[in-house]
Image (cartoon, rainbow, N blue to C red):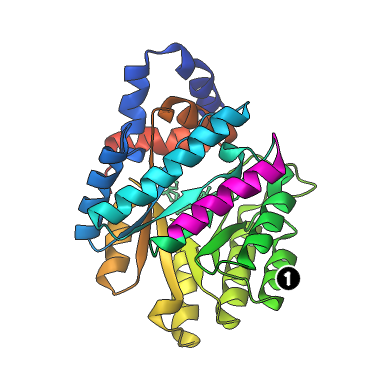
Amino acid sequence: MSWFNRIIVSILPWFPKQFVWIFSKRYIAGKTIEDAIQQSKVLNKLGCRVTLDVLGEDITTLQEAEEEKKECLRVLQAIHDSGIDGSLSVKLTSIGLIIDKETCYQHVRDIVQRAKELDNFVRIDMEDVTTTDDTLDIYRRLRKDFDNMGTVVQAYLKRTPEDVQALIDIGLSNLRLCKGIYDESPEVAFKDKDKIRDQFVEIVYMNLKSSSYSGIATHDKGVISRSLVMLEQQNIPKDQYEFQMLLGVTEKLRQQLVGDGHGMRVYVPYGVHWFGYCMRRMKENPMLVGHIIKNLFVRG
Ligand SMILES: Cc1cc2nc3c(=O)[nH]c(=O)nc-3n(C[C@H](O)[C@H](O)[C@H](O)COP(=O)(O)OP(=O)(O)OC[C@H]3O[C@@H](n4cnc5c(N)ncnc54)[C@H](O)[C@@H]3O)c2cc1C
């Protein structure tokens, strides 16, 4: 399947955008904040919280970083005004991490500060491994002043159990735990799927045991089942964890978990840069093309 996915990825940019949109719209709320809020209202009615994500292109100037920050502030205001049950996810590279770390720090600080004023929460997404240290560094610095934020760790990175333990040790382990989506080298990341699953379950266990908040972000039935057993065996209270899924993915499983009384948050990306986002995601992980094609035919 993988060669087929790679061929599709390489030819998709040559298709009209409207055609690619047919493949992608299930995973993207739309182009505007209003679209994202509308989608969030539907999800709230289904018993799911949301986290909104502004889709950014790779930015190259501090002016663009400033614009992205302003959009994040508008999202926080829109969440507040609409009354939806939702928070914000932000990628540090979209607000300047690679151009100037201190400017990025100030931007994310402004965002978290505004979220605090609006009684909301910001999660810093985790990107490729070249940004891991800086992301964790900025997160630790901000957590000295703010408690309304968390970050993400990736189960495929070999370093992750150590990172989680270090955050637990300093009491800052409000984490979304996921497998990781970037195409990393075998020097830094496990490639074996079972090894990644085992490490995922291990870090969920570490975080839950430490009484830290855990967002268990996966659609993998095996990892979810093992997490459910752990939650029950450890008698973890419902307000110490939630499951998290991407918009449009495994909706039946999502609603089963909601029906069983587990907290669920859906990641809702939106924005005019949806095309670049989809292309990047597919290049990073051509398997996604397989999922997308499958989802055109098999729902739920
Ligand atoms: C809420 C949330 C936030 C995330 N944040 C980050 C982040 O900050 N940094 C990061 O690196 N990664 C992030 N990810 C992505 C994550 O790392 C994985 O790449 C992604 O979730 C797929 O891994 P999986 O655990 O679902 O397992 P997989 O083995 O990839 O998927 C399990 C099953 O889910 C279904 N499935 C998975 N993806 C799709 C899809 N796109 N379409 C249709 N079906 C699908 C398939 O049936 C598949 O067999 C996030 C994921 C979620 C859910």
Say what amino acid the circle numbered 1 marks. Ala
Describe the element under mark 1 as helix, strand or loop: helix
Badge 1 local density, few (<14 within 10 Å), some, or many (20+)? few
**Residue at (26, 57) in percent of width and height:** 84
Q: Is residue 145 above or below residue 21?
A: below
**Residue at (50, 79) in percent of width and height:** 230
| Residue 149 picture location, percent across and down | 52, 63
| Residue 42 picture location, percent across and down | 21, 51
Q: Is residue 227 above or below residue 121?
A: below
**Residue at (80, 47) in percent of width and height:** 187
**Residue at (25, 69) in percent of width and height:** 259
Q: Is residue 157 above or below residue 104?
A: below
| Residue 242 picture location, percent across and down | 42, 69
Q: Quadrant of residue 157?
A: bottom right
Check mark 1 vs ligand 1: CB closer than 8 Å? yes or no: no
Evaluate whether residue 269 shows in this view.
Answer: yes
* Residue bounds of the magenta highlight: 99-115
Q: Is residue 63 left or right of residue 52?
A: right
Q: Residue furthest right?
A: 187
Q: Is residue 298 above or below residue 253?
A: above
Q: Is residue 102 magenta?
A: yes
Q: Nearer the viewer, residue 238 or 226?
A: 238
Residue highlighted by disc 1:
166
Q: Nearer the viewer, residue 197 or 213?
A: 213
Q: Is residue 57 left or right of residue 24?
A: right
Evaluate whether residue 268 shows in this view.
Answer: no
Q: Quadrant of residue 114?
A: bottom left
Q: Is residue 280 magenta?
A: no
Q: Quadrant of residue 140?
A: bottom right
What is the tally of numbered marks visible in this picture?
1
Q: Main secondary structure of the magenta part?
A: helix
| Residue 247 picture location, percent across and down | 35, 47
